[in-house]
Structures are given as structure tokens and as C-alpha cells.
Amino acid sequence: MYVFLQIIAVTVLLLLAQEALRRANRWAVWGVFLLIPLLLTPYWIRVNELGLFSWFKYYTVFFCVCWGTALRFTSLGNRAWARSTIPLLLAVNILEAVVLDLVSHGSAHALNAAAGLLLIATMPYGRNSARIDSANCYRDLLYGISQQWVIGYTLWNWTFVYLNYPSLTGHHTAVLAAGLIVGMNHPGRWSQTRASTLGVNLLFTATSFKGMVAWMDTSIWFNEQVGIVAAGCTLLVMTGCAVHFWLPQIARGGERVRPCIIGAAS
């Protein structure tokens, strides 16, 4: 029960953090996700013994937050080519995890990797896939994904962490829950929220990995059968999303359309 209270507390804090970052100016966001990581990198190298995937993930997420902020608050947001990088960056981040699952052993990893590939295949791409909401003062970066896709991503990423980093499952349950809460109400804002909440979490993880694990270690949650069931459910959800994505194209003779966008412009 105590762990679940911790997860709820972290979820609330991350929701508050993403809202604060949403309202912050570009210099504050760049200070948090560019200047602080640069200053702390020597310390992080000294205190952490992380694999290549973890290091790559840290800096790609920090870059994504900074790049999204540049789109929101500079003239880059008016350029279609710049906005079209949002789905590409998200696809690269998913592909990183898919590769790790593919090189791991076990049916759960294989099932989850397949679900990750379906996530990439069912994302909207192109110049109109993302836009800046200049109508509000926050200038949110809106990316046209559906609620179903957000649910599929949440299940897939939770399963990925559960299979590969079980001690951090509790922390990432909170991170994913924060993004899911926003995504269910405003699907378009999910990618912005996901980047900022994950970025905040990774700042703390890189600075005190052992402390984070000691505070909420969920490694005892791991069970191989649960992992297989979770991966299977994720693949089932993403198969449904893929069918929803491709059937309209088949019906229209291959014409490309956006996938089951439910409230994507919210």
C-alpha cells in the first residue's frame, strides 16, 4: 500500500511540474534541460554505472524537451519541416527501446518489441502532424495522436520498464500516469507532457540513481508470467489501433489518413 501512495504522490508532483514547465519561458526550460545536464554530466559519469541505452535516453529526452520549447517560442514553430521532426524524434525514442527488447531473450521481449514497431507504424507523420497552438498564451505543441494510441504507448512503455528495469517500475508508473491523465483529456498535449515529465524524472534518476531505487524499489514486482501477459495485452491493443489506422486507407484505395484521432486538436 505504501508504494501505491508513493506512486500517487509522484504522479501529482509530476503533473504540477509539467504544468509549471508549460507556463515557464523558454530560458527557464532550457536552463533546466540544457544547462543543468551540461553542468552535472561530470558528476553523473562519476556516480553512475549506466549502460549505453540509459545514457542515450537521458540526452535524447533532454534534447527533445529543448527542441520542443524552441518550436513553441521561436520562429522555428512556423516552419513545417521543423514541426515534422516531432514524430521522427518520438519514433527514434521508441525504436531505441524496441532494439533493446529485440536483443533481449524471452517471448515477452519479442511481443513488446512487436508492439513498439506497431506504435511507430501507426503514428501520424508529415508537415501537418504537429502544430503550435498560438491561440493560447502557453503556445502548446500539439501532436495529432489518438487516445487509443496514448493507451497503447502507456502499456508498451510500462511493460518495457517492467521487463528491463523492474526496480524502476514504480517510478515510471507515476511518469506514465501523469502523461496518461493529460493525454486522456487533451491527446494533442500528450507528447509535450510526456517529454517534460520523463525529463524531470531522468534528471533525478541520473543525479541519484541509488537513492531513487532505495526510496521506491519495485523489483519484487517482477514475475515473468506477468511480463508475458502485459506484453501480449499491449500487442493486442496496438493491433487494434493498427487495424483502425489501416482500414480507412484500404477503404479509400490507399489514401493516407490520420489514425483514429480523438480530440487530437485539443
Image: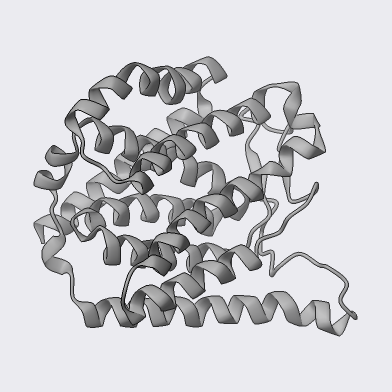
Q: How many marks?
A: 0
At 34% from the left edge and 78% from the top edge, which residue is drawn? 108
Up-down: is 15 above or below 3?
above
Up-down: is 230 above or below 76?
below
Residue 8's x, y, as percent?
25, 52
Q: Is residue 150 left or right of residue 75?
A: left
At 59% from the left edge and 46% from the top edge, which residue is drawn? 89
Residue 148 visible: no
The answer to which quarter of the image holds residue 155 is bottom left
Which colour scheme appears in the figure? one colour
Q: Which of the image's four quarters has the N terminus?
A: bottom left
Residue 185's x, y, as percent?
54, 55
Q: Is residue 248 left or right of residue 115?
A: right
The answer to which quarter of the image holds residue 118 is bottom right
The answer to which quarter of the image holds residue 4 is bottom left
Q: Nearer the viewer, residue 254 or 74?
A: 254
Q: Nearer the viewer, residue 23 or 157?
A: 157
Residue 150 visible: yes
Q: Is residue 211 left or right of residue 121?
A: left
Residue 20's x, y, as percent?
44, 29
At 45% from the left edge and 61% from the top edge, which residue is drawn? 99
At 40% from the left edge and 82% from the top edge, which residue is drawn? 232
Up-down: is 138 above or below 168?
above
